[in-house]
Image: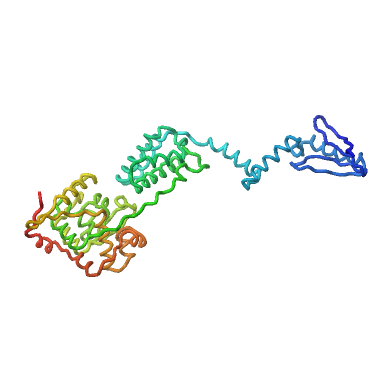
Amino acid sequence: MKKKHHEVKDGSVAIPIYEFSDGRFCVDATLGGRRKRIARTSLDAAKLVARKLLAQVAAGRQGEDLLSMAEAEEYRLAKDKVAEHGVPLLTALDEWISLKTKKAHFISKGVAEIVQELLETKIAEGVSQRHLEDRRSRLNRFAIDFPCPIDRVTPGDIESWLKRLKIASRTKNNYRSALQQLFRFAQSKRYLSRHEPLAIHDIAEIRVKEGAIEIYKPAELETLLRFAPPPLLPFFLLGAFAGLRSQEVMRLEWQDIRFHQNVIEIAAAKAKTASRRLVPILPVLREWLHPLRKDTGRILPFHSYTPFERCRSAFCKSGMRDGDKTIKFKWKSNALRHSYASYRLADVKDAARVALEMGNSPSMLFRNYRELVTEQQAKEWFTLMPDAVNAASKGFSIVA
């Protein structure tokens, strides 16, 4: 049997009342997004309930609780959609409003402008010239290829750009590091939203396959030092007997070598890790450097790495002549520093001490620099005194 229908109205708002066959009357209202039914034994009692609800609506206390059928359906659909993501409807709504409100709270600015601002900031901070040149080169290249506001650069854009660069994987990682600095700087200056992930965030670092670690034998170092031209000799000595990095030697000045304290000071601005350290002047290094010492000035006469590398390459390729035999020196990348770590560790048997001298952690020392050598080989390495090496050069000459 069809239920009899009554309703109580107040303007456009109506609350239906249904009469059931058992004599009960049911007030049918949608409150707070949920359908509620209130049963009474008489029509008058049911109408009283309905009028109370309408009075509440009129008083503005429950207006938002009463929904039309269309509104109730919209609510149900919205709730189902966010439930797929495990998020309550109110949470999703709050996040959406927050995003729409806060997204506009940044200043859209071009990539090139931000790069220039970052470089000027780094100059003011007093970063090393090498770091500044590195960032200028990499970021200006990026700015040329992206003449647009930085907030329009997507992760896909960056990933495609890095893939197009015809460079080694390690170099691509260096570009990625520079871009991380750029995007974080832009976010700190409110050129990017602080409430969204950075475009660089999802660009993974490329896994680099490390090549074999190479070192020199004491006899090879003896050959290198025997014929080293004066401009290159300090570089070879500081790598072989102090384990300094190439760029650290390039920046070093004679006043950094404290003969009176028997240490070499690597200032923070001259160190790769931006951390000051003291490196001991071993007896063999002291014997070689003392005749070369000056009061002031750069250790090497090169103002950048390129002319030094040209000079070094020309020397190694020129060859040395021993009677009728020509010897060409095989240059091994970073082998002087690798050799120092290996021979020094075999000599002192203290990884923490050697790591401190080299500006590394002990774990990195074992992973990147240490090769197994004997104590005897270490002794030969650190006793290559200038008198013995120069005496052995008799009968040799450099091939022009």
Q: Tell me what residue is drawn at x 10 percent, y 56 percent.
A: 325
State the image coordinates of residue 74 (x, y, percent, origin top left): 70, 37
State the image coordinates of residue 1 (x, y, percent, origin top left): 90, 39
State the image coordinates of residue 118 (x, y, percent, origin top left): 38, 40
Q: Is residue 89 above or below residue 285?
A: above
Q: Residue furthest top?
A: 11
Q: Tell me what residue is drawn at x 80 percent, y 30 percent.
A: 12
Kindly indicate the quadrant of the structure image that contains residue 77. Answer: top right
Left or right relative to 217: residue 159? right
Q: Tell me what residue is drawn at x 38 percent, y 47 percent.
A: 173
Kindly indicate the quadrant of the structure image that contains residue 110. Answer: top left
Q: Judge by depth and name the residue closer to the eye, 80 or 296.
A: 80
The answer to whether one can see residue 196 in this image is yes
Q: Tell me what residue is drawn at x 85 percent, y 38 percent.
A: 50
State the image coordinates of residue 249 (x, y, percent, origin top left): 24, 52
Left or right relative to 39: residue 181? left
